[in-house]
């Protein structure tokens, strides 16, 4: 529910051509996934069709799981991850993480090529590549063979230079550490 | 519409205490507003109550205007801006921009203190402060007198150091320029 009505004098940008952008969101700071989710929200407002595939998430509940369900237009949402392997006692062995990520790559290829979407978001694919759960040629193939008008968003820290090289824009989210945050547990709605 | 069902073994983080975070999203790169919108989406999934006040936007249509309307929980959305004064032929004189921003400050104070929200997002308040459409004491007062459990998100480039000093986290979105992006007009769903 909102009372944000478009003012009568509000201008609408006229977009003359659709150029499918390759957008990379990387860096060690917060905001990569949430920025992609915000794009999905905006795209929904424009009645664009969005598919989100989360490569690393899937073991912990996060607000977008329910938040996305209520958007007015189709947002397909897939989680294939089992969390971050090798970190904080994650119980799954490497080969399981690898298998899940390979499933995500196959799913990504299918969704990108389907013609059903205007925007495909590959959330934390950069991390998956860094952790060798997917391979560079696989990721580059997704980028190089996407439909010309499809926007492709790749998020996650440690984006590979060759992925960045192909991007139209690369944004680095840089965390400026703060002592105030230390010791405060994750907060629902802000952190997840 | 989504087929992202929470898997049966999915864990839910237990949040023991709510600590109202002060979050600053700044820098010259893309993703500040979209990250805040993504937080609103996640918060909605958690059934948190969100208020967004956009200090600088209001003259151009952007997807969140309609995207936010369909979220399952209350997201109040206000735009008070008339665009960026002094930039690209913006027709409004400084005093009009200042008056609008002062309205936004009053609205912000009211919403922050109302007790009706879990998260308040002050979008591009940093820009408004930089452009002297609002004053530093006004912004610091909002931060210093917020309810303890309220999360407050301040976005926009050129965040004031004293605002950053009070924050729990400060994220800088840094744009890595790309020749590929030059000459391509804004794309709906990605840029607005």
Image (cartoon, coloured by chain):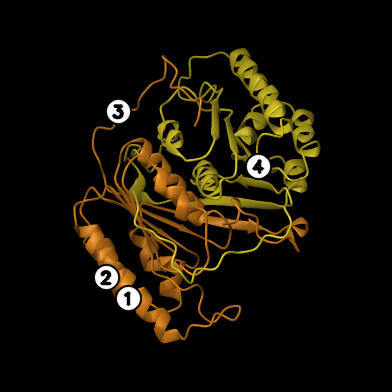
Chain colours: A orange, B yellow
Instruction: Say which residue label 1 marks.
Output: A102
Q: Which mark is residue B4?
A: none
Chain name for mark 1: A
Pointer 2 and pointer 1 on the same chain: yes
Where residue A26 appears, x then y in whole percent? 49, 60
Q: Secondary structure at mark 4?
A: loop
**For residue A14, what is the image quadrant?**
top left
Q: Which mark is residue A106?
A: 2
Pointer 4 and pointer 3 on the same chain: no
- For marks 4 and 1, give the CA distance: 38 Å
- For marks 2 and 3, give the CA distance: 35 Å
Looking at the image, do the residues carrying marks 2 and 1 touch, with CB atoms under 8 Å apart? yes
Q: Residues within 10 Å of mark 1 (few under 14, many from 20)?
A: some
Q: Nearer the viewer, mark 4 or mark 3?
A: 4
- For marks 2 and 4, give the CA distance: 39 Å
Q: Which mark is residue B118?
A: 4
Left or right placement of residue B14 versus residue A120 in this view:
right
């Amino acid at each position: 529910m909102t009372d944000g009505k478009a003012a009568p004098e509000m201008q609408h940008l006229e977009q003359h051509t659709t150029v499918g952008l390759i957008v990379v969101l990387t860096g060690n700071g917060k905001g990569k996934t949430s920025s992609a989710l915000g794009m999905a929200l905006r795209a929904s407002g424009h009645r664009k069709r969005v598919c989100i595939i989360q490569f690393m998430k899937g073991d912990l509940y996060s607000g977008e799981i329910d938040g996305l369900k209520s958007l007015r237009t189709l947002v397909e949402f897939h989680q294939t991850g089992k969390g971050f392997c090798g970190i904080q006692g994650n119980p799954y062995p490497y080969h399981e993480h690898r298998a899940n990520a390979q499933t995500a790559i196959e799913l990504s290829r299918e969704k990108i090529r389907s013609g059903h979407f205007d925007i495909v978001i590959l959330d934390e694919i950069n991390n998956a590549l860094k952790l060798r759960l997917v391979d560079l040629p696989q990721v580059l193939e997704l980028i190089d063979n996407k439909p010309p008008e499809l926007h492709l968003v790749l998020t996650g820290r440690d984006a590979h230079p060759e992925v960045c090289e192909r991007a139209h824009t690369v944004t680095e989210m840089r965390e400026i550490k703060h002592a105030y945050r230390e010791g405060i547990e994750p907060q629902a709605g802000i952190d997840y």
